[in-house]
Amino acid sequence: MAFERFTSDLFVAYLNRDFTAFKKDIRGRMHASIEAKFGVWAKNHVRFRRQKHASVAELEEAVDPDGWNLVFKDVAAMKTKADLWLAASHARRVKSLSAHDAQLIETAKALRNFVATRALRRRRR
């Protein structure tokens, strides 16, 4: 869906402007994982390279190492991720989507999914 590609590109563009919140989220989750698996000592010895700016290619790989679009289950999940990953000014833009906007987005995704699965079922008959 073109909208999914748009939202993926939008998040990468926002991250390209300021990826401080994204780094903080990733660092926190990685440290929690390391501590759970290897203990506090190991967590305290893992350091992240300081980086002021990341290229678009690096950010695309960071948000989805498999090379797909960044896809959200629903608008609520997109807003949650915006809170975690985006600078406050950019997150506000995503979180400003109204209930009407969310319904339109969810309806478009549901229609696309319905058409795609029905088309596959018809070909298999």
Image: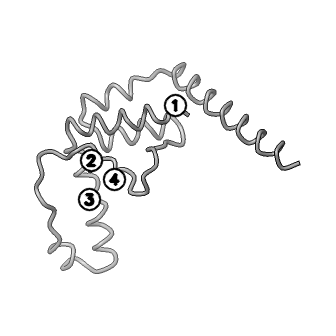
Sequence-first disc among 4 and 3: 3
Amino acid marked by disc 4: Glu
Where residue 61 is drawn, which disc sits there?
Answer: 4
Mark 1 = which residue?
A: 2
Amino acid marked by disc 1: Ala
Sequence-first disc among 2 and 1: 1
Contact flag, marks 4 and 2 (Cβ < 8 Å): no
Q: Quadrant of the N terminus?
A: top right
Task: From the image, state whether disc 2 or disc 1 is nearer to you.
Answer: 1
Find the distance from the CA under tag 1 to the CA under tag 3: 32 Å
- Assess disc 3: are there few (<14), some (14-19) or many (≥20) residues with their C-alpha within 10 Å of its C-alpha: few
Amino acid marked by disc 3: Gly
Task: From the image, state whether disc 4 or disc 3 is nearer to you.
Answer: 4
* Residue 105 x/y as whole percent: 55, 27
Mark 2 = which residue?
A: 22
Q: Is residue 116 left or right of residue 45?
A: right
* Residue nearer the viewer, 1 or 40: 1
Placement of 13 over or under 42, stated as above or below: above
* Residue 92 x/y as whole percent: 31, 27
Q: Residue at x 46, y 49 (%)?
A: 68
Find the distance from the CA under tag 3 to the CA under tag 2: 10 Å
Q: Residue at x 29, y 80 (%)?
A: 38
- Assess disc 2: are there few (<14), some (14-19) or many (≥20) residues with their C-alpha within 10 Å of its C-alpha: many
Q: Residue at x 34, y 25 (%)?
A: 93
Mark 3 = which residue?
A: 28
Find the distance from the CA under tag 4 to the CA under tag 2: 13 Å
Task: From the image, state whether disc 4 or disc 2 is nearer to you.
Answer: 4
Q: Secondary structure at mark 3?
A: helix
Contact flag, marks 3 and 2 (Cβ < 8 Å): no
